[in-house]
Amino acid sequence: MTTAPPGARHPERARQNAAAARSPPLADPVPAAVQELYDGRIRGRGCLNWWEARAWGRLSGVDHIFTIDEARQLLSEVRSRAEGLIGVRADLVEIRQALSDGSPSPLGGLAEAKALEARMSELLGWFPASGIELKGLAPLLIDFPAVLDGEPVLLCWLEGEAQLGWYHKADHGFAGRRRIPS
């Protein structure tokens, strides 16, 4: 059995790894903890940039770091959009189940399901466009990338919560949620 030279099996990944090694440092102002995370852990992974390297726990196009106040100010818009999303999600589940069972639904059929899927995609797109990471759909779970006490964290909101009151480190996930200090 012959071993392929490095990069032969995945030439695109090899090009990305090479580009990552040449990537410039993060733009200022960057908290020291984030720069250290980038320099120490991210470059070694051969990723294109620190967001893709899961610095905040997920692959993401998110490019904004929130303050706690910014995230809380945005929460009323988040809740409003979440309500619309929850309604679309429920209707879509009902139609899909009816289609799966071969039974009629008062909400419609395949065309209506496709329309709801398009609407859901549109609603979901708002979150990353606003700098928010979407972590779960049912229940809706979102994270606002932030820095707390010099450490990169995710301010965490779960469908049904009245306010933004929790955070966790990216490596700890939902199970590591803690109250945001006052």
Image (cartoon, rainbow, N blue to C red):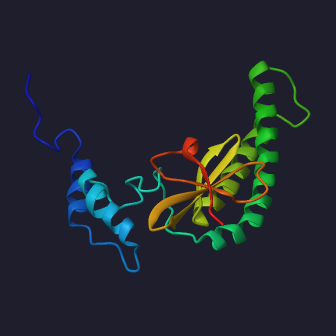
In this view, which residue lies farthest toward the right?
A: 106
Looking at this view, is 14 or 165 the one in front? 165
**The N terminus lies in quadrant:** top left
> Residue at image x 21%, y 61%?
21
The quarter of the displayed image where residue 2 is located: top left
In this view, which residue lies farthest toward the left?
A: 2
Looking at this view, is 102 or 38 the one in front? 38
Q: Is residue 175 above or below residue 75?
A: above
- Residue 162 in the image, given as x and y percentages of width and height: 79, 56
> Residue at image x 16%, y 41%?
8
> Residue at image x 46%, y 62%?
152
> Residue at image x 48%, y 56%?
60
The quarter of the displayed image where residue 48 is located: bottom left
Q: Is residue 110 above or below residue 162?
A: above
Q: Is residue 65 above or below residue 85?
A: below
**The C terminus lies in quadrant:** bottom right
- Residue 137 in the image, given as x and y percentages of width and height: 66, 43
In this view, which residue lies farthest toward the top?
A: 101
Instruction: Tell me how many marks there are.
Output: 0
For this view, does 56 lie left or right of residue 44? right
In this view, which residue lies farthest toward the front?
A: 182
- Residue 31 in the image, given as x and y percentages of width and height: 40, 73
For this view, does 126 lie left or right of residue 172? right
